[in-house]
Image (spheres, grey):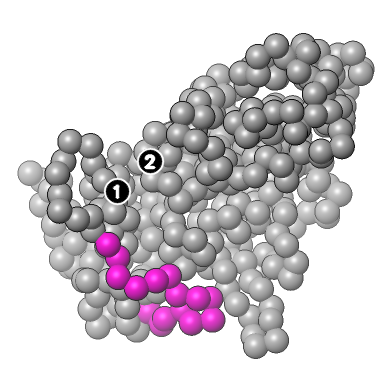
Amino acid sequence: MTAGSNQTPLLEVRNLRVEFPTRRGTLVAVDDVSFSIAPGEVLGVVGESGAGKSLTGAAIIGLLEPPGRIAGGEVLLEGERIDNLPYERMRRIRGARIGAIFQDPLTSLNPLYSIGRQLVETIQTHLPLSAAEARKRAIDLLKEVGIPAAESRIDHYPHQFSGGMRQRVVIALALCANPRLIVADEPTTALDVSIQAQIIALLKRLCREHGTAVMLVTHDMGVIAETADRVAVMYAGRLAEIGPVRDVVKNASHPYTRGLMGSIPSLGVRSERLTQIDGAMPRLTAIPTGCAFNPRCPEAGQRCTVERPDLMPAGVTRAACWLYAPGGVGAALTREAANA
């Protein structure tokens, strides 16, 4: 897979498969997912609830809830395979080279400790600094993420911060050891719109200034359009489409992605009603044969019900859709557009 630039990918996910063994058989929650992220790039991962976005992120950072397990594929961080490491080794990597930002900051912060203590402990776990040096770094991090009066607020407790400020503290925690990769799982969902915009701007600046790669998991296409360089659209545990964010938003190839984009209202454009995708995401126990989207797809054909498509070139993006098979209608239209 190629990353968004000519640089060597910082993160490579190859044919990732996540399974949940149950009494009724094994459920496949993430099925043959591959992508890469370059240094300084934000990859947005989007889809409905149950698409497998958060599980993909959890598998990458080694925090899958049992009985979930990685049953196939590889995860490489800067060329080193990390999906098969012992727990203690992965725990060290998770703080030092991978930072994690979760949806609810209260689950990431210990209510019994001041934020300063939590930052200093995290810094000293991963960096060879004295307590005084770690405290200075903690104050600098709080300033960097936009906490006012950081020198005094460092000794406050999580309940003394607003939701947006707590999320900033969580981002500071994730940045403690200058990680190369940040996995952010719905980092703005619980925040109001003005705070969302500030957190998005902060993530983009950190990417630009530190060369950090970011995997941004969300169901909010507005956040993706504003933040990401590329976007991966997931459906029923697989990638439906992946490509530059502008092309996916403006000129989506996969029928599912087109439905997602059509459901977003546009400023300045009057329409009687928004596009909707009929039906619902299939449960893991009832994923259809062929393309998992075929029961909801307005363009499904016979092949879609029996044979599952892999990602294939669809203009600028790549889509898992038989429309873009050689000789398919979509492939022909893509060629015409390219030649126009």
Foreground residue, 167 or 253?
167
SS class, disc 1: loop
Q: Is residue 4 left or right of residue 246?
A: right
First along the sequence among labels 2 and 1: 2
Q: Position of residue 97 (x, y in %)?
A: 71, 36
Q: Are marks 2 and 1 in contact (CB under 8 Å)?
A: yes
- Residue 337, relative to residue 306: is it above or below? above
- Residue 25, relative to residue 11: is it above or below? below
Q: Is residue 198 left or right of residue 137?
A: left
Q: Give the residues drawn in magenta, as a range.
A: 276-290
Q: Is residue 282 magenta?
A: yes
SS class, disc 2: helix
- What residue occupies the far left of the structure in this picture? 340
- Residue 66, relative to residue 289: is it above or below? above
Q: Is residue 239 left or right of residue 296?
A: right
Q: Is residue 168 magenta?
A: no
C-alpha distance separating marks 2 and 1: 8 Å
Q: Position of residue 246 (x, y in %)?
A: 30, 39
Q: Is residue 7 left or right of residue 243?
A: right
The answer to whether residue 284 is seen in the rendering is yes
Residue beneath the point at 19% across and 62% down: 330
Residue beneath the point at 65% across and 19% down: 147
Residue beneath the point at 76% across and 32% down: 158
Residue 264 is labelled as: 1
